[in-house]
Amino acid sequence: MDVLLTMRAFRRVVERNSFYKAAEDLAITPAALSKQIKQLENRLGTLLLVRTTRSMSLTEAGLLYYQEACRLLGEFDALEQTVAASAQQVSGTLRVNAPLSFGLTVLSPLLPPFMQRYPQLQVELTLDDRVLDVVAAGFDISLRIRRRLPDSSLSARALGEVHQRICAAPDYLAQHGVPQTPNDLPRHSCLAYSLAERPGQWQFTAGEESLSVTFAPRLIANNSLMLRDMLVAGLGIGSLPSFVADPEIAAGRLVRLFPEQIAEAHQVFAVYPTRRHVQQKVSLFTEFVREQGLMTAN
């Protein structure tokens, strides 16, 4: 039972002194309204209304419930109005740091609706694949894509999960053959992300089993978009985050390898300086990004 909804329905019945008129106001049938009030009485274990064919009156318990319901609903409505008004008045500058590829592919379409929602808020966005010092650089929030975060004095919140895709261009696979298992990878031309925790090593899981593959990269780059272009050009096999790889796979420019053996997943973390109270602009941005559902399928 929706307590607030039922409380509002009860208040309307009392104010209109009629189930029929209250039901009209609430756009439901009198029978449905009567059922709501009966469920409320059953939940409270007491009779709130005495009804006859010609009249309706409040019991002592009903009068108490009506008075308190009016007070609580008034406070709840005032709270919602205050929060809504406060959200519209968010202002100042929000300084955000994020990886370049994530910023261009994920944040770019998210920022316009966020900034439209908070028109008085300015956003200063710094895109850099390196892990920058949040405090020293003066960022309010830094988005980081890692398997796990090292212990630090910073606060962090996981916003979603990003899976890695091992992939290659159709032309490369036609020329060099399709590796059948991750163990075949060291015999291929592999491209690596230099800022990964282990640039020359990829981890796989299949059920409860895990596998680590080490290789000597033919090319190492510090940006996923650069790696994507090299893979599409047929230079070799590489690991890309799902938000970079999936559009290329869908378009047929890349082929995903070993879908049954999942490459290691990473979390998208929101990292910010530790404060007793997180700034409202940081909370709003963090929640907005989280709501977008960054979690991707394996």
Image: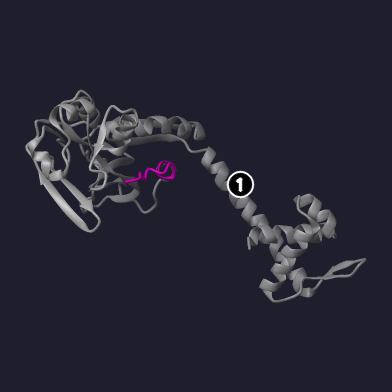
Q: Which residue is mark 1?
A: 81
Residue appearing at x 73%, y 76% in the figure = 46
Closer to the camera in the image, 199 or 86: 199
- Image position of 1 (left or right of 269): right
| Residue 225 in picture, x, y percent from top left | 25, 28
Is the residue marked by circle 1 packed among few (<14), some (14-19), or many (20+) residues within 10 Å?
few
Which quarter of the figure has residue 168? top left
| Residue 40 in picture, x, y percent from top left | 70, 68
Q: Secondary structure at mark 1?
A: helix
Q: Amino acid at mark 1?
A: Gln
Q: How many marks?
A: 1
- In the rendered image, the vertical position of residue 165 relative to residue 64, given as above or below: above
| Residue 193 in picture, x, y percent from top left | 17, 35
- Image position of 50 (left or right of 214): right
Q: Is residue 78 visible?
A: yes
Q: Is residue 281 magenta?
A: no
Image quadrant containing the N terminus: bottom right
Which quarter of the figure has residue 184? top left
- In the rendered image, the vertical position of residue 223 relative to residue 147, given as above or below: above
Q: Is residue 297 magenta?
A: yes
Q: Which stretch appears magenta?
A: 285-298
Q: Residue furthest bottom?
A: 45
